[in-house]
Amino acid sequence: HYAPLGIDPTFNVGPFFLTELVTVNVFTKPTKLVTCGVFIHMKQTQNTYERMMEEILRHFPNAEEIRVIVTDEEEALVK
């Protein structure tokens, strides 16, 4: 089984941005979205999101097998 990883830079909290990572729990019927991570950062740049993915891979090496990443076309994420 695999599930897509959704990345949604949802809103700013004062001088910070909050980005939520969500995936689908394929083991529930019906399937449901679940939060699998939250990142707080100061910039919405390509470098910021690359570092976020580096941290994910550092802590979860199997995440290299992610096949689909879903985004709302945030410019820094689609580069």
Image (tube, rainbow, N blue to C red):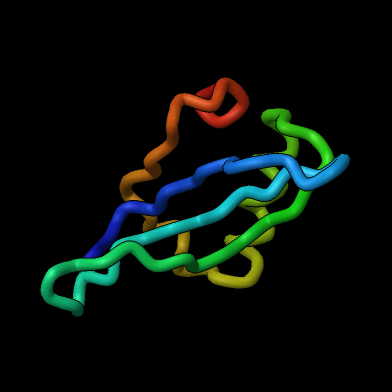
Residue at x 72% of width, y 29% of height: 45
- Quadrant location of residue 43? top right
Quadrant of image for the N terminus: bottom left
72 sits left or right of 46 in the view:
left
**What is the x, y in percent for residue 25?**
28, 71
Asked if residue 46 is positioned above or below residue 36 in the image, the reply reads above
Residue at x 56% of width, y 54% of height: 20
| Viewer-closest of 60 and 70 | 70
Residue at x 57% of width, y 21% of height: 75
Instruction: Find the residue positioned furthest to the front.
Output: 14
How many marks do you count on the picture? 0
Residue at x 39% of width, y 67% of height: 34
Instruction: Find the residue positioned furthest to the left.
Output: 29
Instruction: Find the residue positioned furthest to the bottom.
Output: 27
Quadrant of image for the C terminus: top right
Asked if residue 22 is positioned above or below residue 17 in the image, the reply reads below
**What is the x, y in percent for residue 74?**
54, 26
**What is the x, y in percent for residue 11?**
65, 41
70 sits left or right of 76 in the view:
left
**What is the x, y in percent for residue 61?**
53, 68
Asked if residue 56 is positioned above or below residue 27 in the image, the reply reads above
